[in-house]
Amino acid sequence: MKNKEIAILFLVLIVVTGSELSILTNIALWHDEAFSGLLPMYDFKEMIYRIGLDVHPPFYYILLKGWFKILGDSLFVLRLFSVFFGILAVLTVYFLVKEAFKNRRFALFVSVLVALNSFFIQFVIEARMFTLGIFLVALSSFFVLKALRYKNWLWWFFYVLSVIGGVYTHYYIFFSVFAQGFFVIYWFFKESGFNFRNWLENKNIQYGFGAYLLMIFFYLPWLKTFLSQVVRVQESYWIPPMNIWSVPATFLKITTGGSIDTFRFWYVLTALMITIVVAFIYVLKRFETPTKWLIFLLLIVPFLGASIVSLKTSIYLDRYFIFTLPFYVILIAGAIWAVQNKWLKNSLIAITILGSLVSFPLYWASLEVEKKPGMAEAATYLNREAKHSDKIYVGSSFVYFTFKYYNQTGIHPKLYQPFPLLHFSGTALLSPEDIIKDFYQDIEKDDIVWMINTTGFGNYQPSLPDNWVKIEEKGAQDVYDYRGWIVVTKYQIQ
């Protein structure tokens, strides 16, 4: 049966997607997701303006705004957007691998591993731009292979559109585009050698050169905003500097979805990296097709690029390497696929699939989500208890937007912020009417004030006036330790 692999892949996607949908709203919204959910609620012009005040490009939010128009803006719908592109990403990986290696069974093996990957699923159920980015990187890689092989201007045009979509989705995708560019140059030298006349007469090179010029042209409208965002990032950045275990720890997370104490378990990371390097060398030697270099570059260039840039300003963060995940999986799966001993090969395939099957369930069980409702429970409590005449203040910008998303009290919450905020606190979504600089502003005797705070994100606790008398308090733990507890306290003004 010619399409047996596609049928199996769809079956796997139905089962995996069903599992993802069953837990889609189990974790409370957090700061970055709230930013995603609130931004598309502005009118289009205002939304684009506020995106420019942030540090991300606009394509994800533009598409999400259209998604909201069709399906609404509930938390389920918000995260469903990521699930949708997660499905498209897995399917695109299948067609990319089939095109690159001309082997449907290998393409099925890779795409199943991607669909089951714990790190991948973590972002499938999160309302951010990562699955859209993975889809566009895989799609542009598929199109560039088609363009190079079939020398058709239409494939080059599709490549341009997918690249533009990618770099307008996340800036890390520039690294993936550079990787594709290096491969294109390699392919051109492979076709025409060092003969300058051959280069001038080669239609593929002409189309390719035109394609990259068109990409630059399409990016020019955003270039000024991009440069201003770069300055904003350099002025105040929060990502910690790299260390010798940064890259190994990222590969561990991509492989298992989890993390460990890098200094305590350094030997685990060392063993993992030795295994990965050996696997890469083996697969690059065993696979003869030149397309293996595209896959290798799409994995390695983002790591090299981010590491080099981080020498000046740290931009190295595990989750940004989600865009390399399919290519890592391809190379590891390729090393297994290239094993000549049939029994060993089948055993490794079975072990890898089994490991992928259990990795996310184990990760999910370790979270104990049912015991950690976070802002979802805190906001439900406030929505039930707060009266229209009450006031609601929030002590941290990192929970201000999450409450604002859940808020159904009819009360406009105010963020207590006596000092200027840094951009990563979500300043792009703040207006002057959202801020209160002192706790004596607009407060009268006998007023009821609800204070929302967090023990996470640095554990900043503002000092309250002496005439605020605590009446009751409720706390709800968030899923991840760095997010701490959401604490809601009711005060009466004396």
Image: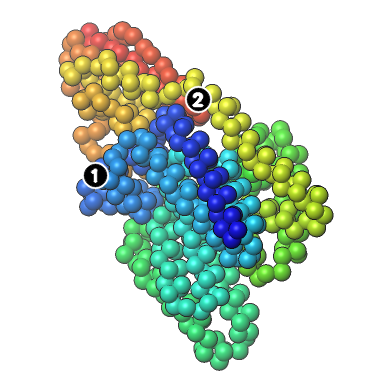
Marks 2 and 1 in Cβ contact (< 8 Å): no
- Residue placed at 59% from the left, 43% from the top? 117
Q: Position of residue 73 (x, y in %)?
A: 30, 38
Task: Using residue 181 as the reference point, say whether residue 64 is left or right of it.
Answer: left
Q: Is residue 119 left or right of residue 267?
A: left
- Front position in the image: 432 or 156: 156
Element class at badge 1? loop
For disc 2, the neighbor class at 10 Å (few under 14, some 14 to 19, many from 20) is some
Residue at the (54%, 45%) spot, across then down: 11
Q: Disc 2 designates what residue?
A: 369
Residue 357 x, y percent position in the rendering: 62, 38
At 77% from the left and 51% from the top, the residue drawn is 345
Vertical side of 163 occupied by 416: above or below: above
Could one spot residue 406 in this view of the protein?
A: yes
Disc 2 marks a residue whose amino acid type is Val
Using the rendered view, name the quadrant where residue 255 is placed: top right
Q: Is residue 336 left or right of residue 162?
A: right
Q: Which residue is mark 1?
A: 42
